[in-house]
Image (tube, grey):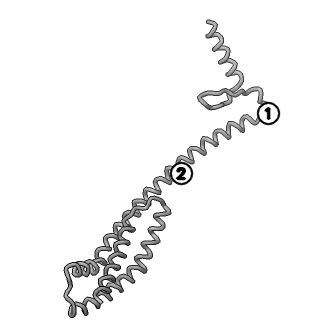
Amino acid sequence: MVDTYRKENSRICQEFENIERVALNAPKSTKEMIELGEFMLNVKNHQMVALQEQIEESKKHLLYLIDVHIFSESDISLNTSTLAWPDRIRPVFEQNTEIVEDCKAKFEDNLQKKSEWIVRELEKLAARVQELEELGDITAVQQYTYVSWAGYTVHVPYCTVQYERESLSSKREG
């Protein structure tokens, strides 16, 4: 009966240790943050209730065993640890809330930066589309030519290109 009592207390402690380990592990993605939130919700609503009932049952066994068994130091330590876990786990829940809030803020900041980058890229594309629309006038085709500059192909009025070519030719001759 004492061995069963020890094993049950050890199992209860292991469950609390697992909750603590998972709760204090910062999520690396929004998916992990959602999974952690679901885990913690299950812990608070179901697992803690079950563990509290198991600890109450353990207390009843302890009260019986105190009268018929002499506990070793390790048994006393295990009993103390088992009975202390409900109080020890409360700060872990608070720390978990802080961790999740920090990660949520970080993820929101990242999302905001990505959103701003996308808006900038869309503005650049809109400018390019506007250029293409301006080039769409078939009657003005001869007025434009394409010039490659700094890796971009841009259109400029034909007369400007002609002037620049003449200027370059005169500089080479002189």
Find residue 88 and report its horizontal and vertical position in percent: 29, 74
Q: Residue at horizontal 62%, vertical 10%?
A: 172
In the rendered structure, the answer to whether residue 147 lies left or right of residue 27 reads right
Mark 2–mark 1 contact, CB under 8 Å?
no
Name which residue type carries label 2: Ser
Q: How many marks?
A: 2
User: In which quarter of the view is residue 37 placed?
Assistant: bottom left
Q: Residue furthest right?
A: 139
> Looking at the image, is mark 2 or mark 1 earlier in the sequence?
2
Mark 2 and mark 1: span between their CA atoms? 37 Å
Q: Quadrant of the C terminus?
A: top right
In the rendered structure, the answer to whether residue 52 lies left or right of residue 76 reads right
- Residue designated by label 1: 138
Find residue 140 and report its horizontal and vertical position in percent: 77, 30
- Residue 107 or residue 92, whichever sits in front: 92
Q: Residue at horizontal 41%, vertical 76%?
A: 43
- Residue 119 or residue 66, whichever sits in front: 66
- Residue designated by label 2: 115
SS under mark 1:
helix
- Residue 154 or residue 72, whichever sits in front: 72
Find residue 167 and report its horizontal and vertical position in percent: 64, 14
Closer to the observer: label 2 or label 1? Answer: 2
Find residue 132 and report its horizontal and vertical position in percent: 70, 37
